Structure formats: C-alpha cells, structure tokens
C-alpha cells in the first residue's frame, strides 16, 4: 500500500486530525509483515500513521532523507520530465504526460511501490509514460468561443491550490477563471481559512452554494459560500458568489474572452455545466 498524505477532511466522519490519522494507522496496520508500505515522509501525519506497523516502511519525498525522490523537474508543453532517485543514485528518467508537481509525487509513489514489489523498471517507466490521467482531474473537455474548458474534482484546499498552480504553469499569463462548488458545509466551514488562500493563482473566482452531501441544511449552503467569497476578495482577488449553475454558463458566455481558461471545480454536480457547452460544440 501507499499513503500519499493525511490532511484534515471528511469532518462528518473524523472530528479532528488525530482521529483521521488513527484511521490511516488502522489501514496501514492491515499490510502484513511481509508487505511494503510506501509513505510520504514530507507529511508528518502520514509518518505518524505508520508508526509501529509491521510492514516494511519505504519513504518517498525529501531528496535528503527519503528512500525515493523526484529531482531535476522540467516542465514541457506535453507534460513534465523528471528523474527518480533511489536513495543517492539515479534510478530512471521519467516523461509524464501530465502537468503539475503533485502528479510527480503521485508518479513517484507509484514507481516506488511497484519497484519495491519487483515490477520491472522498464515496465514502470513505460506505464508512467503512457498514462494520460483520469476523468475530472485537470480534464480538458474542449473549447467554447476560444475559451479552454477544464473539469476538475478538487474539493479540498490542497487540491484546489495544486490544480490552479498547475493551470498557471501550463497557461502562463492567460486569464484563469475558476468556478468552485464547495463540497459539504462541515468541510468548508472548518477549512475556511485554508480555502480562502487556495485561489491565489486564479484571476476570476466564482463561488457556488455548497453542495451539502450527507448533510441536512437550510440556508447554510449560500451563507457559507458567501463568506468564502468575501474572504477570497479580502485577499485582493476578484471573487463573487453565484447562485446557480445556470448563472455560471451565462458568465462564461458573457464575461470570458478568447484565450481565457475556465475551470469548473468541485465534487458535486458542477461538471454538468460543461455538458451544455460540449453539446454546443458537437
């Protein structure tokens, strides 16, 4: 197994980081003594989760102390290139068809786990090189009036920040719009400060009412989103609250211009807005 990171989330199940870390510890303990557990040594909570487990621990992350690390990263138009080092030696050079340094860490963890259980290195390199990503993870779904449309599942501040930073790396100075549908009142409220800082790489931010999964609510979806929009704006970003998915579509029609990048982001039903544009494209 591999543990990429442990961070506060799913507050309807885990009230704090300690209880979440304990859940990951229970998961890690299921890997038998003869097994391998790959863990991110840059994440303190992840390292705590694997304390005193019986499996062999292999670390990835920090080049100074980790067993596996990614080095010499180079962004390319078609993805990212980097070297994988095993302890103090170059193991393989990788060409990834994905953008974003977070994807480098994902690929590094996958490579380390496969190598540690005996998968041939050439197969690992070929597998990573041919991987084109998954649905709703920085998925370019098309263009509308020369606006690039991207769909993404991010609904945690860490993922929001990583996705928008990746968009900035890929699209440079092009204007980036982000329509965000927060997911769960409990998550959005508990991580309000983190969410407010996670949109800094966007030029225009549109905040929809919270998608209240597994929660009973009244006016909270709009109230919490209004507060998030205010906090983003207080940081000097252009941010506004938008009441519905239909209004998002109208905004794309009326306010974007050729060359803009529009990212619909969230784990609710926000991906529906792209269907309207893709129907028009077809």
Image: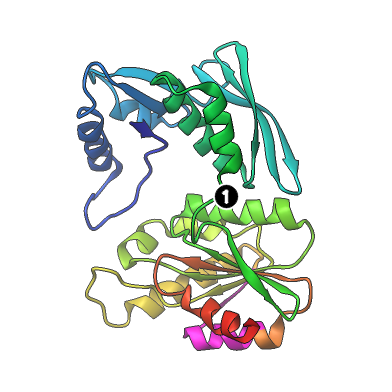
Quadrant occupied by the N terminus: top left
The color scheme shown is: rainbow
Residue 76 location, x and y as percent?
A: 75, 43
Asked where in the image residue 57 lies, by quadrant, the reply is top left
Magenta span includes 45:
no
Q: Position of residue 230 (x, y in %)?
A: 53, 72
Quarter of the figure with residue 55? top left
| Stretch in magenta | 238-252
Residue at figure coordinates x 46%, y 74% from the top left: 270
| Residue under label 1 | 132
Residue 105, image x, y percentages: 53, 35
Q: Nearer the viewer, residue 250 or 97?
A: 97
Element under label 1? loop
Crowd around label 1: few <14 · some 14–19 · many ≥20 (10 Å): few
Location of the C terminus by quadrant is bottom right
| Magenta-drawn stretch contains 247 | yes
- Is residue 131 found left or right of 112 in the rendered image? right
């Amino acid at each position: 197994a591999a543990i990429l990171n442990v961070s506060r989330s799913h507050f309807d199940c885990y009230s704090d980081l300690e209880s979440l870390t304990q859940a990951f510890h229970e998961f890690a303990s299921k890997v038998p003594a003869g097994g391998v557990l790959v863990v991110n040594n840059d994440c303190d909570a992840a390292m705590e989760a694997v304390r005193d487990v019986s499996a062999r621990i292999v670390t990835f992350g920090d080049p100074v102390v980790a067993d596996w690390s990614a080095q010499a990263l180079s962004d390319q138009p078609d993805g990212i290139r980097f070297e994988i080092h095993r302890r103090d030696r170059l193991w393989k050079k990788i060409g990834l068809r994905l953008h974003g340094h977070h994807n480098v860490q994902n690929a590094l963890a996958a490579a380390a786990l496969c190598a540690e259980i005996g998968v041939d290195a050439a197969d690992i390199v070929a597998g990573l090189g041919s991987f084109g990503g998954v649905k709703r993870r920085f998925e370019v779904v098309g263009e509308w009036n020369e606006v690039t449309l991207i769909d993404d599942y991010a609904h945690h501040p860490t993922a929001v920040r990583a996705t928008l930073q990746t968009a900035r790396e890929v699209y440079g100075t092009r204007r980036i719009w982000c329509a965000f549908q927060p997911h769960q009142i409990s998550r959005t409220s508990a991580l309000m400060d983190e969410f407010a800082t996670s949109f800094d790489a966007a030029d225009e931010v549109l905040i929809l009412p919270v998608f209240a999964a597994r929660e009973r609510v009244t006016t909270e979806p709009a109230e919490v989103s209004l507060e998030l929009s205010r906090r983003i704006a207080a940081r000097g970003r252009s941010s506004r609250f938008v009441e519905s998915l239909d209004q998002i579509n109208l905004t794309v029609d009326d306010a974007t211009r050729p060359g803009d990048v529009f990212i619909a982001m969230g784990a609710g039903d926000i991906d529906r807005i792209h269907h309207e544009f893709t129907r028009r494209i077809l």
